[in-house]
Amino acid sequence: MEALFATVTGFLAASGLYLALRGRTFPVVVGLTLLSYAVNLFLFSTGGLTTDGAAVIQDGKTHYADPLPQALVLTAIVIGFAMTAFSVILAMRVRGDQGSDQVNDQRGDEAREEKS
Amino acid sequence: MDFRGFDTLGEITVLCIAAIGIYKLLNRLRLFMPSSDSEGRPWSKDLHPMLLATVSQTLLPLALLVSVFIFLRGHNEPGGGFIAGLVTAVALILLYIARGVDWAQQRLTFQYQPIAVTGVVIAALTGLGSWLFGHNFLTSAFGHFAIPYIGEVELATAMLFDLGVYLTVVGATLMILANLGKLTTRHRPSKENDKETV
């Protein structure tokens, strides 16, 4: 269970980092999203992985999952949601203004030089 | 609810700031809109299929009912203002998708920015209100009231906080998605909307 969890987290983080270093805005946005998933999973695992534990307090249950990482990761997911939305729109704005989705934006530089 | 409300307060503040930032980013944004797909085929003329339009309108009251249920349930069980707000926002966004911006704009005439900001203010004031009674920030007062025909109901100031969360989530989500959808229409978020020839 732990090995699988660690592999998945590592794979997501590696894919996210690779995509975030790409040259166009769309892979960068997808990469940031994957990276935030990896961080969420990592935060979730900080309390240790509990198998068969109840998430909410119920009568007759004695075995519970650690609630603190759950609360942490819930907040992280929401912040990640807001950040993803913002970066998507930022990428769109760049595409609309510069006419190019290159991250280091050579075409935009040329256009600006022509203008000035 | 006590200090555990802090994270939610932070969440809705971030969400509201992100939504306002996105609203400003979309201001006067123009995107190239192709009239056909990559292989030269024109887009479908049937923009708003009847099936989705009918289903979405039937779905709206049901979704609102579910969101009220989740909202009220959230006090003692899983649920709450955040997810109730998301359910409401999804139902309204479905209207936009099914009927188009023009149709939805005529019926949803209110602005989303004030709703989101009001939500944050309500939530923060609820938290501050507990100081007036000498308690810690975000301490919740609650009591049991007997309401005629309904029976005994537990009312808490946490519900007021949840209402703020609900309003923020609805306002912020709609502010992001509805304004994004309006980009290619004449309701495009822009200060010179009136002067522009469309």
Image: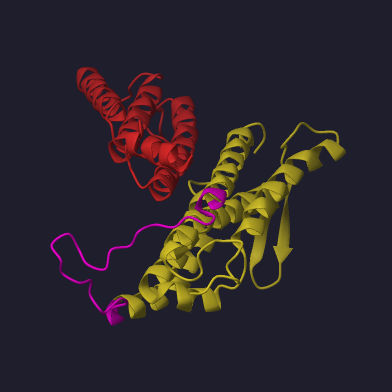
Chain colours: A red, B yellow
**Magenta region:** B23-51
Q: Is residue A62 above or below residue B46?
A: above
Q: Residue B129, position in %: x, y? A: 80, 42
- The answer to whether residue A58 shows anywhere in this view is no
Looking at the image, residue A21 sits to the left or right of residue B76; the answer is left
Q: Quadrant of the N terminus of chain B?
A: top right
Q: Main secondary structure of the magenta part?
A: loop
Residue furthest left as drawn: B39
- Please tell me whether residue B24 belongs to the stretch shown in magenta: yes
Q: Is residue A51 above or below residue B71?
A: above
Q: How many marks?
A: 0
Q: Residue A115, position in %: x, y? A: 46, 43
- Please tell me whether residue A45 belongs to the stretch shown in magenta: no
- Front in this rendered view, residue B96 or B11: B96
- Front in this rendered view, residue A78 or B187: B187
Looking at the image, residue A98 sits to the left or right of residue B118; the answer is left
- The answer to whether residue B68 shows anywhere in this view is yes
- Front in this rendered view, residue B22 or A9: B22
Q: Residue B3, position in %: x, y? A: 66, 31
Q: Residue at x 25, y 25 (%)?
A: A18
Q: Residue A54, position in %: x, y? A: 38, 34
Q: Quadrant of residue B40?
A: bottom left
Q: Residue at x 34, y 27 (%)?
A: A41
Q: Residue at x 15, y 69 (%)?
A: B41
